[in-house]
């Protein structure tokens, strides 16, 4: 944890806000008209909005969005999907009540308003285009998110495997650590891993899954990642655990993967690839995967094509794009890979995020000692908004198991996945 938030997130107070006047006195007629227009675009939203002078509109449910100043109101009107997050991070917008519940109601109201076309504000939900996925841009995007410092992520991820991906909760009452172990074992069972096999992992986070596969399934792993922080951490971890001879962590892009494998796996990388590069990823798998091998891609997704939330794309996850299943098929169809199994773990990701946010909240004072207030608020909003996105169905979590179309070494049913 080394960088202050206002530099890493690019948040400023903006002198231009002064053009909209101060917050002294009551709201103007224009301010009230703008607030009413915003609320009209969110039918039956289940919350209210209040201006700095006490003017309020909406449903009195105990949930409220409070605009602290005129500039905040007008900035949200210009670009709501980006500015709401920035202004909340800066404390110029506050939320009274449960933040996750309010965001859930907001997302549902946005979907209703968009579907019924009740507002002339069609730009209200149009996100910016994600940053391109060239090799240089990919390195910049990954650096932005993952090189914040390993200590930061250690505060709120699971303490055993440092998994920054969806956990799996097959039984009630599971801890985050148990659920992450269950996720890793679930993937390994799908890949039918056996001792002595070779595995290629594209994008390995801090290396916990690669080490889990080697330690518990007796395989050798070659894992690729372009985050220097994560690669260094993973190599040190492998050396400490005596697994460096069975797990090779390589600092390189997935496009440069070479070698042959019995299983190809990617957990949480596809969101950073970009649809325009899916055919390239398919070619990588094709040149590496053995004739009777299995592959699995685990990715955040959508029910239909759509861009990432503009604020998250700009401030938290640059270059991110969650694909639809149809878009994911661009990996498999050109090379005639057979899709064997598709599982949606959407609610498991919501559960994972709740656990992460609870730990983040527990460690908030530690985060504040290194980062400024806007950073801590931004990451809490990101985690809360992600919970809401999965509980409302805005986002999905797909695990897609595949093999070559000529592979007849297939199980007769799925019973082995749940033993």
Image: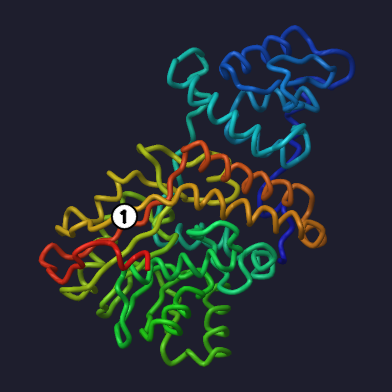
Residue positioned 43% across, 55% down in the render? 272
- Residue 405: x percent and y percent? 13, 62
Q: Is residue 315 above or below residue 401?
A: above
User: Farthest residue toward the top?
Assistant: 29
Q: Is residue 271 above or below residue 181?
A: above
Indicate left or right for 298 with 21 as reference. left
| Res 324 quadrant in image | top left
- Residue 153: x percent and y percent? 64, 65
| Front one among 404 and 215 | 215
| Front one among 23 and 63 | 63
Q: Which residue is mark 1?
A: 277
- Residue 400: x percent and y percent? 31, 57
Question: What crowding class fits label 1: few (fewer than 14 Cα within 10 Å), some (14-19), or many (20 or more)?
Answer: some
Residue positioned 31% across, 88% down in the render? 196
Q: Is residue 104 above or below residue 223?
A: above
Q: Quadrant of the N terminus?
A: bottom right
Query: How is the protein colored in the picture?
Result: rainbow
| Res 199 quadrant in image | bottom left
User: Farthest residue toward the right?
Assistant: 24
Q: Is residue 5 above or below residue 239?
A: above
> Could you tell me how many numbered marks the image carries?
1
Indicate left or right for 138 with 56 as reference. left
- Residue 277: x percent and y percent? 31, 55
Residue positioned 50% across, 68% down in the render? 205
Secondary structure beneath disc 1?
Answer: helix
Q: Quadrant of the C terminus?
A: bottom left
């Amino acid at each position: 944890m080394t960088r202050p938030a206002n530099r890493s997130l690019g948040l400023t107070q903006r002198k231009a806000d002064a053009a909209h006047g101060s917050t002294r006195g009551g709201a103007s007629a224009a301010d009230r008209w703008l607030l009413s227009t915003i609320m009209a675009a969110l039918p039956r939203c289940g919350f209210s909005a209040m201006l700095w002078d006490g003017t309020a509109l909406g449903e009195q449910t105990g949930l409220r969005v409070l605009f602290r100043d005129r500039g905040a109101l007008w900035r949200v009107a210009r670009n709501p999907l980006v500015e709401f997050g920035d202004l909340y991070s800066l404390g110029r917008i506050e939320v009274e009540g449960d933040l996750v519940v309010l965001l859930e109601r907001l997302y549902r109201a946005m979907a209703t308003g968009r579907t019924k076309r009740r507002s002339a504000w069609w730009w209200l939900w149009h996100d910016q285009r994600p940053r391109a996925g060239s090799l240089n841009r990919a390195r910049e995007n990954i650096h932005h998110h993952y090189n914040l410092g390993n200590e930061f992520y250690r505060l709120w991820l699971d303490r055993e495997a440092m998994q920054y991906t969806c956990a799996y909760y097959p039984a009630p009452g599971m801890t985050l650590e148990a659920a992450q172990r269950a996720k890793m074992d679930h993937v390994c069972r799908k890949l039918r891993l056996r001792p002595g096999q070779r595995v290629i992992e594209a994008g390995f986070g801090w290396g916990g899954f690669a080490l889990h596969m080697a330690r518990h399934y007796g395989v050798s792993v070659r894992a690729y990642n372009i985050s220097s922080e994560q690669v260094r951490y993973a190599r040190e971890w492998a050396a400490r655990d005596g697994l460096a001879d069975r797990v090779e962590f390589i600092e390189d892009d997935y496009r440069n993967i070479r070698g042959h494998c019995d299983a190809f796996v990617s957990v949480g990388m596809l969101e950073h690839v970009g649809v325009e590069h899916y055919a390239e990823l398919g070619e990588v798998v094709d040149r590496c995967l053995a004739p009777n091998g299995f592959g699995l891609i685990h990715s955040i997704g959508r029910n239909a094509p759509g861009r990432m939330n503009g604020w998250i794309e700009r401030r938290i996850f640059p270059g991110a794009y969650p694909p639809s299943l149809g878009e994911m098929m661009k990996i498999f169809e050109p090379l005639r890979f057979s899709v064997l199994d598709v599982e949606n773990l959407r609610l498991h990701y919501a559960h994972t995020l709740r656990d992460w946010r609870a730990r983040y909240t527990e460690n908030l004072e530690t985060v504040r000692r290194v980062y400024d207030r806007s950073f801590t608020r931004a990451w809490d909003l990101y985690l809360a908004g992600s919970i809401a996105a999965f509980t409302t169905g805005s986002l999905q979590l797909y695990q897609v198991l595949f093999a070559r179309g000529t592979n007849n070494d297939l199980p007769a049913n799925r019973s082995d996945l749940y033993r």
